[in-house]
Amino acid sequence: MIVVLSGGVGGARLVDGLARVVPPERLVVVANSGDDLWHWGLRVCPDLDTLTYTLSGRADPDRGWGRADERFLALETVRELGGADWFGLGDRDLGLHVTRTAWLRDGVPLSEVTRRVCAAFGVQPTLLPASDTPWETKVRTDDGELAFQEWLVRRRAPPARAIRFEGAGAPPAAVLDALDAARLIVLPPSNPFVSIDPILALPGVRERVAARPVVAVSPLVGGRAVKGPLAENLRDLACDSGRPLAEQLVPSIILDHYGGLIDRFVYEDGDRPPAGVPCLGTRTVMSDVADRERLAREVLAFAEVDL
Amino acid sequence: MIVVLSGGVGGARLVDGLARVVPPERLVVVANSGDDLWHWGLRVCPDLDTLTYTLSGRADPDRGWGRADERFLALETVRELGGADWFGLGDRDLGLHVTRTAWLRDGVPLSEVTRRVCAAFGVQPTLLPASDTPWETKVRTDDGELAFQEWLVRRRAPPARAIRFEGAGAPPAAVLDALDAARLIVLPPSNPFVSIDPILALPGVRERVAARPVVAVSPLVGGRAVKGPLAENLRDLACDSGRPLAEQLVPSIILDHYGGLIDRFVYEDGDRPPAGVPCLGTRTVMSDVADRERLAREVLAFAEVDL
C-alpha cells in the first residue's frame, strides 16, 4: 500500500501522477481537512475537492483549484448584494458543497461523503479525509488569531506568528489502518505547516508515520514555493531573522521541519541537497500530466517500490 | 397608497405594470412567503424573488421565474452526485439565496433582507414579505400532506384535497399599516388558493382587506389558468364533480372564492362576467411589458384611482 498525506494543489498533482502508475487498490490518499470551512452556510473542503477534481480530470488546469469550464454567476450576485465575496466559489463547485452539506446534515460522516463523491466522479484510488470530525487550523497574527481561510484568502496571508490545530479528533479507522499497512508513505510537495502538520497532529498519526518508510518531496524550488504561502510561513516561523533569507530557504529547512520522520528526500535538481538522508535531485515542478507521472515514477523507484 | 397582495409570476407581471404608472412611494407590494422553502440548506422565497427579479428587469422573460441569462451549473453537479435536483435553482439565483440565508442566520428579519435586496437591485416600490416568521402552505393529497413546493414542483401537483397554512404568525407592522392606509387593494391574477389565501390567513389581514376598496383581476382565461396549478385547484377544491368542469371554470368561481372581499372585478374579455359587483372585461393576459402597463392603467381607472 502506498499512502500519501496531501494538501491541495501541489499534493494533488503528485497524487495524480501516482494514480497513473499505482493500481488504485494499492493507493490511499489522506487529505488534510483542517482548512475546511463553513462559507455561505455550506461546508467547503478545499483540499479534498482539489484532489477529487484533479483525480477525475475536472480541475481547472491553469488555476490548479476549482473546476474547469467554471463560471462564477452566484458569486456575482453575492457581490451585487454586498454579501461575503472574499472566497471564490464557482457555480459547478457550489453543487458539490450543497450536496455534501445536505449529506453531513443528515449525519453522513465526511469519509462516506467523500466516498460517494469519488464514486460519482469516477475517482478510483481511496481518498480519505484525515478526520471525520472538523478540526481547525488557526493562525496567530499581529491582528489576533484567524481561521485558516480567513488568514490565507481573505487577509492574503499576513505574517504568521504561530499555527495551531484546534479540536483535532481521532482520524477514521481507515486512515490508521492504511498507515499501518503502508509499504511507503509519501509526503508530496504540500506546505508542511498548514497542509501536512494538521494531519500529523491528529492522534495516532505521527507515531504511525514514524514507524513506516517515508519519502518527502520538497515544495521549495530555487528558494521559493511553487504556490501558496509556504515561503512566508518559513520566513515567519522557521527562519532566523539575523541571516539572509535566501540562504535559509533551501530544501534542508523542509527536512528539518519534519524532525526525523523522513527516510528519503526528493528535491529540485539544482537546489542544495540536505544532509542526513538519501536524496534524489530531479525536476519537482509538475507543469503537465507527463511531469506528474514522471515524478511519481521517480519517487517510487527512489523509494525502491516495485509496481 | 396602492397595496397589492401578490404571488409569483402572474402577480409580478401586474405589479410590474403598476410600478410603471404609480409613483414608487405610493405602491406597496405584499408578497406571499408561505411557499418559501429550505432547499440545499438555503432559504428560497420564490414569490419574493420573482417580484424582485421582475421589478428590476432581471427576470427571465420566457420562463417568468428565475433570472435572465441564467445557467444551472450547480444543479448539474448536484444531479451528477445524486443530490436533490427536483427544484431548479439557477446559479445567479443561488447567489441571492446564499446571501439571504446568511443574513437570516444573523437574525436579520426577512422584511429587512427584502429591503436590502430591493436596494441592491434598484427596486423602487416597497416590497414586503407577508410575514417575517416562516409559515407554510401544506397541501393534503391522497398520499398524505405535502409541503407546498414538494406538492407543486417535486410531485407535479397531484389532486389537492385540502390546503392549510401552518404557523401563520402576525405580519410585520408595515404590512398592516399599508393595508390600513390603502386607497385601493389590488388582488392580481395570482392563484387564490396558494398565493392569496396564505396572506389573507395571517392575523389581522382579512379584516383589513375587507375594510378597504378591493379590485381583483381574474386569473382564469377561457376556462384555464395562464400558469400554474390553479385549474387543478379549482377542480379539486371548488367544483362540483356532478357538473361539467368547463361550465364551472368561469370568473364567478374566483369572485365567489374571495367571499365578499371584492368590490370590483376585472376578467378576461370574452369570458362570462360574474354578477354581484361592477366588472370590467379586458385583455388580462400580459404577454409583454406594454400589456402589463395597459392592464395596470385600466385596473386603476376602473377603480377610480387618480394618479
Image: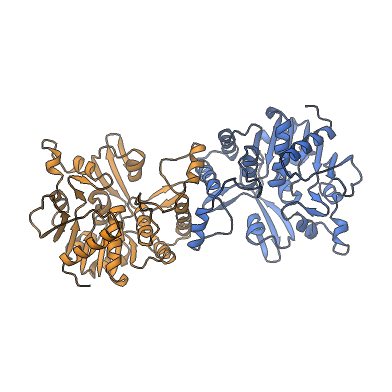
Chain colours: A blue, B orange
Q: Is residue A204 visible?
A: no
> In which quadrant is the C terminus of chain B drawn?
bottom left
Q: Residue at x 31, y 72 (%)?
A: B25
- Numbered-mark total: 0
> In which quadrant is the N terminus of chain B drawn?
bottom left
- Quadrant of residue A209 within the rendered picture: top right
Q: Can you give x and y, in whole percent of width and height, for residue A81 in the image? A: 47, 62
Q: Is residue B204 left or right of residue A171?
A: left
Q: Can you give x and y, in whole percent of width and height, for residue A85 in the image? A: 55, 59
Name, please, the residue furthest toward the left: B275
- Quadrant of residue A132 within the rendered picture: top right
Q: Residue at x 73, y 31 (%)?
A: A21
Q: Can you give x and y, in whole percent of width and height, for residue A286 in the image? A: 75, 44
Which residue is at the front of the view, A25 or B132? A25
Q: Can you give x and y, in whole percent of width and height, for residue B117 in the image? A: 42, 62
Which residue is at the front of the view, A58 or A10? A58
Q: Residue at x 20, y 62 (%)?
A: B209
Q: Is residue B221 visible?
A: yes
Q: Is residue B173 left or right of residue A82?
A: left
Residue A192 versus residue A57 in the image, above or below? below
Q: Is residue B275 left or right of residue A271?
A: left
Residue A155 versus residue B77 in the image, above or below? below
Residue A21 versus residue B237 in the image, above or below? above
- Quadrant of residue B292 within the rendered picture: bottom left
